[in-house]
Image: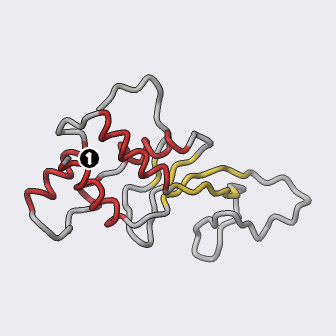
Amino acid sequence: MSARTYLLPEVQGDRWTDEFKPTVIGSAPSRVAAEAILFGLEWGSIYCDQEGDVLTNIGTIAWLDGTVFMRQRDENTLIAWLASRLRQFNMCMTDGHEDDEGTRVFNDCYADDGDSEHEWESWWAIDADPDEFWAFVQQVARR
């Protein structure tokens, strides 16, 4: 992995399923957010039950976790894939504006009547299937 001269933003959530998407808070460029996701997720917990050859899966996870050397070109390829699938959302962070389930809703705030000050934050969220990424990673790793 390359040495960075800047800090990566924090990734919220280490899971990536159809229901849970990794997110990055802040207004970082999409490439930096994608880099944060690549290096901020716990790939072993995401793909622990992946079907297929066990050794291939373990090697792929080790490659993603940085315990096996990844060439700069491959790293950039994975970051580009993630960046192309990031979507930017706005979220109201004003206290007390959660929905009935206690979670905040992207791009929506039922309590924002336009007359009061609301605290909005910009978030990046991955809008992609983790299995599609897994297949892509294995293609890149085999080059």
Residue at 49% from the left image edge and 53% from the top image edge: 84
Spot occupied by residue 98 in the image (x, y as percentages of width and height): 65, 67
Q: Secondary structure at mark 1?
A: helix
Q: Residue furthest bottom?
A: 100
Residue at 76% from the left image edge and 71% from the top image edge: 110
Residue at 43% from the left image edge and 56% from the top image edge: 13
Spot occupied by residue 15 in the image (x, y as percentages of width and height): 37, 61
Q: Residue furthest front?
A: 143
> Does 102 sit left or right of 7 as displayed?
right
Give the camera-side residue of 114 and 3: 3
> Does 63 sit left or right of 136 as displayed?
left
Spot occupied by residue 126 in the image (x, y as percentages of width and height): 48, 58
Q: Residue furthest right?
A: 115
Residue at 25% from the left image edge and 44% from the top image edge: 65
Give the camera-side residue of 39 and 142: 142
Q: Give the quarter of the figure containing the N terminus.
A: top left
Spot occupied by residue 137 in the image (x, y as percentages of width and height): 27, 53
The residue that mark 1 highlights is 64
> Does 92 sit left or right of 57 as displayed?
right
Say few, some or many: other residues with alpha carbon within 10 Å of mark 1 (under 14 / 14 to 19 / 20 or more).
Answer: many
Kind of residue at disc 1: Leu
Residue 28 in the image: above or below residue 88: above
